[in-house]
Image (cartoon, rainbow, N blue to C red):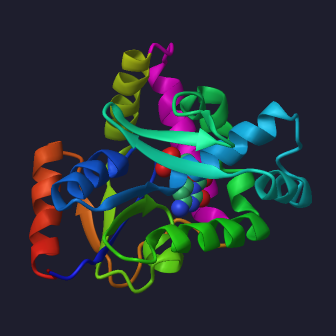
Amino acid sequence: NQKISIAIDGPAAAGKSTVAKIIAKSLSYVYIDTGAMYRALTYAALNHSIDVNDESSVVKVLNAIEIRFENRVDGQHVLLNGNDVTDAIRSPEVTNTVSIPAKHRLVREEMVKRQRVLGESGGVVMDGRDIGTHVLPYAEVKVFLLASVEERAQRRYQENIEKGFSSDLEKLKEEIALRDKLDSEREFAPLQKAEDAIELDTTSLSIEQVVEKIMDIVSLKL
Ligand code: C5P
């Protein structure tokens, strides 16, 4: 019974974490949310009033923080130096800033190192932007999830409302499009489909349908 690595990449709010969690659970694999790691770093930098455009300042923050995932009955929690930041890292401020600290080469190199350690024993579902291209280039399954900006904004809108954040659909559309642009156009490890990744447009698919399609691909590798 071989344990494989599954890489799920794609633009913001394409449903990566939702399906990655379900797949990890059904295979009893570990789920690693790499976006949460960049978010935790951003949260720490904002808290210390660090200039997120300054690479060496951001690297210093990263070197001073430990980011841990903990699975509890109510889901996965993100711990930043032992403090629970699960909800705090989803704030609009963090969301609209995170692409800046994430563009720095030295930040990405350190994150990739940490992510590879987390995924080294296999049996992992990892989601992000550069998992198939950089973090786990040898992953047995690589999926690139897509959806229209309208659909993704609508999904994020629902999420925000459920979390009690105020939300504006038009503004969300602009923010998602901008984040995609920054993530796609950055110099180091931009958002990009790996050559050997399978592209899945989820615009008109339900979560269950997306999970089923990915599980079909996974079952061929087990
Ligand atoms: O996946 P999520 O939307 O939480 O990711 C937040 C941000 O973290 C992305 O917009 C991107 O700037 C950055 N990120 C990244 N590489 C990853 C995962 C996330 O640059 N592997």
**Residue 114 locus on image (x, y percent):** 61, 67
- In the image, is residue 207 above or below residue 165? below
**Residue 58 locus on image (x, y percent):** 83, 53
Q: Residue at 75% of width from left, 70% of height from top?
A: 105
| For residue 180, side relative to residue 4 (left or right) | right
- In the image, is residue 28 above or below residue 15? below
Residue 205 visible in rendering: no
| For residue 23, side relative to residue 197 (left or right) | left
Dominant secondary structure (helix, strand or loop) of the stretch shown in magenta:
helix
Judging depth in this view, the residue of 197 and 88 nearest the camera is 88
**Residue 98 locus on image (x, y percent):** 66, 45
- In the image, is residue 91 above or below residue 186? above
Judging depth in this view, the residue of 192 and 211 nearest the camera is 211
Which quadrant would residue 181 be assigned to in this image?
A: bottom right
| For residue 103, side relative to residue 159 (left or right) | right
| Image quadrant where one finds the C terminus | bottom left
Which quadrant would residue 73 be assigned to in this image?
A: top left
| For residue 119, side relative to residue 221 (left or right) | right
Is residue 123 part of the magenta span, yes or no? no
Residue range (magenta):
164-186
